[in-house]
Amino acid sequence: MNVLVTGGAGYIGSHVVLALLDAGHSVVVIDDLSTGCSDNLPSDIPFFHVDIRDEQALRACFEKHSIDAIIHLAAKKAVGESMKHPELYFSVNVEGTRVLAQEARRAGVKTFVFSSSAAVYGNPSESPVTEHTPLAPESVYGVTKKMGEELLLWFGFTLVNLRYFNVVGYDPSGRITVPEKQPQNLFPILCETGVGVRERVQIFGTDYDTRDGTCERDYVHVTDLATAHVRALSLDESITLNLGIGRALSVRECVYAAQEVFGEFAVEDAPRRPGDPAAYYANPSRAQNVLGWEAQITDPVEMITTMKPLYE
Ligand code: WQD
């Protein structure tokens, strides 16, 4: 297949591009390089330095390349920032998806794989979270992802809608060399602290009603996630799939795993971060059944080991 990957130079996108090429697909990448990095892309694939809201530029891309399917990852993704700048999130994540959908339909593309998020569930009413768990996003980011899901369905595409849980790690074979800039999430923060770029890690909340009092999340490795995208291309009906490993790790367990990889570093108990749900994890059985997909990397030490070389 000839697959267009929007956001293909980003953290998840660059791994999806590698997985597509490994599986023998052709790839075209669109990225505005606002957070992505072209050094993480093979130099011989067609690359468009384009904002997905730019109708003319998208049209030129579709005129130049015959696209069989689109994996749409281009988006703003910081929850905190989305609350401060809702206009940016509605513009890029919703209006950008609208323009892309319009130009894709014009070009005769039928299939979309969409990068959605567990953020559409908000503070999930049950765990494990299934695809039937009620949607109740609690951030602008989560709302824009939910709107993106709906928009693509209403445009009539065959939509494989992938709801990611907490994505971590890097390509274990070392093909990605530039880590995300200004990371906001726990695992990259652990790595930066491990190599001394940060002085300490703060644990946001130690009094939750959980195994050890810290928040629990379902961390899924980016390489496993990328595999799911490739398999999603072979589906011919619209479906929503949760992508997680089906098990939760606490913040403290992640800290211990990072200390096993990097050695001891300073850790500080800190107040709860507003808006954080105590605990949730995915029920990934639908993805397992439909895609024959199962996460291969489930040990946090192994996950962090794949990140270490990028921070040294
Ligand atoms: C994980 C846990 C923190 C930093 C968010 C979005 C979600 C998805 C992934 C995009 C939490 C704790 C963190 C730190 C800490 N985003 N923590 N100290 O909030 O679960 O999920 O990112 O699609 O939609 O909501 O991820 O990595 O920020 O936090 O104690 O310095 O680590 O409180 O419990 P989160 P995270």
Image (cartoon, grey):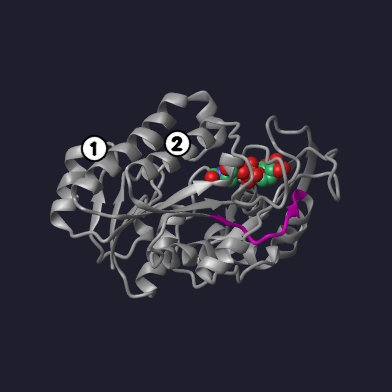
Residue 248 belongs to the span the image colors magenta:
yes
- The part of the image, by quadrant, that contains residue 254 is bottom right
Residue pictured at 77% horizontal, 48% vertical: 266
Mark 2 and mark 1: Cα distance apart in space: 20 Å
- Identify the magenta region: 241-251
- The part of the image, by quadrant, that contains residue 2 is bottom left
**Within 8 Å of ligand 1, the CB of disc 1?**
no
The secondary structure type at the circle numbered 2 is helix
- Find disc 1 in the rendering and name its residue: 54
Residue pictured at 28% horizontal, 38% vertical: 99
Relative to 184, residue 259 above or below: below
Residue 209 in picture, x, y percent from top left:
85, 41
Horizontally, residue 85 falls left or right of residue 24, namely: right
Q: Sort mark 2 into few (<14), some (14-19) or many (20+) by Cα contacts within 10 Å.
A: some
* Quadrant of the picture in which ligand 1 is shown: top right
Of mark 2 and mark 1, the one earlier in the sequence is 1
Residue 271 in picture, x, y percent from top left:
78, 32
**Which amino acid is tagged 1?**
Asp
Q: Nearer the viewer, residue 227 or 102?
A: 102
**Which amino acid is tagged 2?**
Met
Q: Sort mark 1 into few (<14), some (14-19) or many (20+) by Cα contacts within 10 Å.
A: few
Q: Nearer the viewer, residue 1 or 182?
A: 1
Relative to 143, residue 311 above or below: below
Residue 198 in picture, x, y percent from top left:
64, 45
Q: Nearer the viewer, residue 23 or 32?
A: 23
- The part of the image, by quadrant, that contains residue 214 is top right
**Disc 2 versus disc 1: nearer the observer:** 2
- Find disc 2 in the rendering and name its residue: 147
The secondary structure type at the circle numbered 1 is loop
Residue pictured at 25% horizontal, 54% vertical: 109
Relative to 22, residue 250 above or below: above
Residue 168 in picture, x, y percent from top left:
58, 56
